Structure formats: C-alpha cells, structure tokens
Amino acid sequence: MAFANLQDVQTRLGRLISEAPEIDQVNAWISDVEATIQSRIEDLPDRVAIDPVYEALVKKIIAQIVCRKIKNPDGKQNERIDDYSYGLGSEAARADLKPTEDEWEELAPGSSAGSEAFTVRMPIAPGFSERWVW
C-alpha cells in the first residue's frame, strides 16, 4: 500500500518533477521511506485506513523527508564560495531517508494526546468500537 506519491512530493517541493530519471528516483525514495516507517509501525496500513488525519500526517512526513533529500542530496551542512557562505541546521541537512526524532514522535500512536504516562493503549481491531455498547 502506497501512502504518498509523486504528486504529494511535487506539491510540497513547489515544482514539477518531469524528467524520467528523477521521477524514478523520487518514487524509489518514497518507497524507501515508507518501508522504513512500516518497519517500525507494523500496523501502519490499519492506522491509515481508519484515521484520515493520521493518513494525512503519514503522507506529509513521507513527502517532507523526500523533499529534504531532493533539496540537499549530499547532506551538505555548509557551503562557501569566495565570500558567500550558506549553512543548514543538522536536521535540515540530513540526506538520509529516515524520519527525524520529531517526525517519529509525530508518527507515534497517541502522540497528539500529550503525556502517556498513565495511558492504556488498546490494539486496533476492525469493529472494535462496535463491541462497546452502553
């Protein structure tokens, strides 16, 4: 199941990706990021299927990781040409296709609920809410 696509990346990047080699590369990067996320969140397809807000969040994070790679494929943090210099923070300069700690936190189940110190998390099961009748 694909969670993001080329159009999602183009929209966030602010430009078209039209060259065949770049299209192939971006599609491969999208697949790589999705595999990385799904390796940690095994029930990702179920969560995306039942929660449209979570689906939008997953799409956003995948696209922004790929955009980071497109904008800075070598992971350069600083560049200097004569008296001109340009620098990026360590998070913005990342060239790997892995979510940052903040992105993993956003993807974590229940992360928007604040502290989970006293939270009991129930597994997602189809028809789960139908079993609880008051």
Image: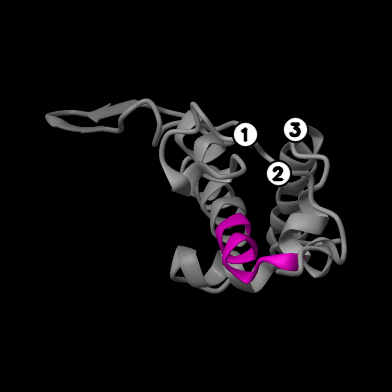
Residue under numbered circle 3: 40
Residue receiving disc 1: 98
Residue extending farthest front: 134
Q: Residues within 10 Å of mark 3 (few under 14, many from 20)?
A: few
Q: Amino acid at mark 3?
A: Arg
Judge from the rendering whether residue 78 lies leftward or rightward of residue 95; answer left or right: left
Residue 33, disc: 2
CA gap, disc 2 and disc 3: 11 Å
Upstream in sequence: badge 3 or badge 1? 3
Graded by Cα atoms within 10 Å as few (under 14), some (14 to 19) or many (20 or more), the crowding at tag 1 reads: some
Q: Nearer the viewer, residue 43 or 5?
A: 43
Q: Nearer the viewer, residue 71 or 47?
A: 47
Q: Quadrant of residue 1?
A: bottom right
Discs 2, 3 touching: Cβ within 8 Å: no
- Marks 1 and 2: CB-CB under 8 Å? yes
Q: Which residues are magenta?
A: 50-58
Tell me which amino acid carries mark 2. Val
